[in-house]
Image (spheres, rainbow, N blue to C red):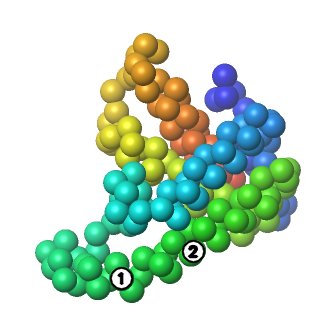
């Protein structure tokens, strides 16, 4: 099981990424899907957690904010995905590279969590649940993100 190893660890000023080829392929595929969502409809409910409401009580200010800020936020998110795509096959990253990976993995978790309607205290998922694989993927992304944070803070 994936929990018995450390996929990310600090080695001096760099970070060692210990993912096998299949894990890197899954991550790359998920990032491609996320890129498609970011390039798509800004009102897609799957990406709502990536762009939380800034002015909930003022729809006019919210609309203005979205008009002004949304494209810049999308550009920054896409730039992060570009960094990860360029480094997906590397076994070491610098701190900026790891920060991009953390950001991308967090974006993936937010989108997947939205799609699965995950809350702060999720119930155990039955292996027979049609979304069991997606929940396992969500858990794997959380595990990976946790190890990135630990490595960065060590």
The answer to which of marks 2 and 1 sits earlier in the sequence is: 1
| Front disc: 2 or 1 | 1
Q: Residue furthest top?
A: 128
Residue 32, relative to residue 141: is it above or below?
below
**Residue 15 visible, this orientation:** no
Q: Which residue is mark 1?
A: 67
Q: Residue at x 83, y 50 (%)?
A: 89
Q: Quadrant of residue 61?
A: bottom left
In the rendered view of the protein, which quadrant contains the N terminus? Answer: top right
Confirm whether residue 69 shows in the render.
Answer: yes
Residue drawn where x is 56% and y is 75% of the image: 75
The quarter of the image holding the C terminus is bottom right
Residue 18 found in image quarter: top right
| In this rendering, position of residue 3 left or right of residue 126 | right
Q: Residue at x 77, y 53 (%)?
A: 88
Q: Is residue 64 above or below residue 11?
A: below
11 or 131: which is nearer to us? 131
Where's residue 113, x and y in %? 41, 44
| Tag 2 residue | 76
| Residue 111 position in % (x across, y down) | 45, 50
**Where does residue 53 sit, x and y in percent of width and height?**
28, 69
Identify which residue, 21 or 124, lies in the foreground.
21
Q: Classify 38 as above or below 58.
A: above
Q: Secondary structure at mark 1?
A: helix
Q: Position of residue 84 (x, y in %)?
A: 71, 59
Assess disc 2: are there few (<14), some (14-19) or many (≥20) residues with their C-alpha within 10 Å of its C-alpha: few
Residue reaching furthest to the left: 57
Is 96 left, or right, of 134 in this rendering?
A: right
The answer to whether 62 is drawn above or below residue 143 in the figure is below
Task: Check disc 2 and report its element: helix, strand or loop.
Answer: helix
Q: Tell me if mark 1 has few (under 14), some (14-19) or many (20+) residues whose alpha carbon lies within 10 angstroms of its own.
A: few
Cα distance, mark 2 to mark 1? Answer: 16 Å
């Amino acid at each position: 099981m994936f929990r018995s190893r450390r996929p990310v660890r600090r080695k001096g000023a760099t970070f060692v990424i210990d993912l096998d080829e299949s894990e890197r392929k899954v991550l790359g595929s998920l990032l491609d899907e996320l890129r498609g969502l970011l390039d798509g409809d800004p009102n897609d409910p799957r990406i709502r957690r990536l762009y939380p409401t800034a002015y909930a009580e003022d729809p006019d200010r919210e609309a203005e904010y979205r008009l002004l800020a949304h494209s810049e936020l999308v550009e920054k998110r896409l730039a992060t995905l570009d960094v990860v795509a360029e480094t997906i096959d590397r076994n070491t990253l610098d701190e900026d590279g790891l920060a991009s990976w953390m950001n991308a993995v967090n974006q993936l978790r937010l989108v997947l969590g939205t799609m699965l309607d995950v809350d702060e205290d999720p119930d155990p998922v039955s292996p027979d649940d049609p979304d069991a694989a997606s929940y396992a993927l969500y858990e794997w992304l959380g595990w990976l993100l946790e190890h990135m944070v630990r490595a960065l803070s060590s």
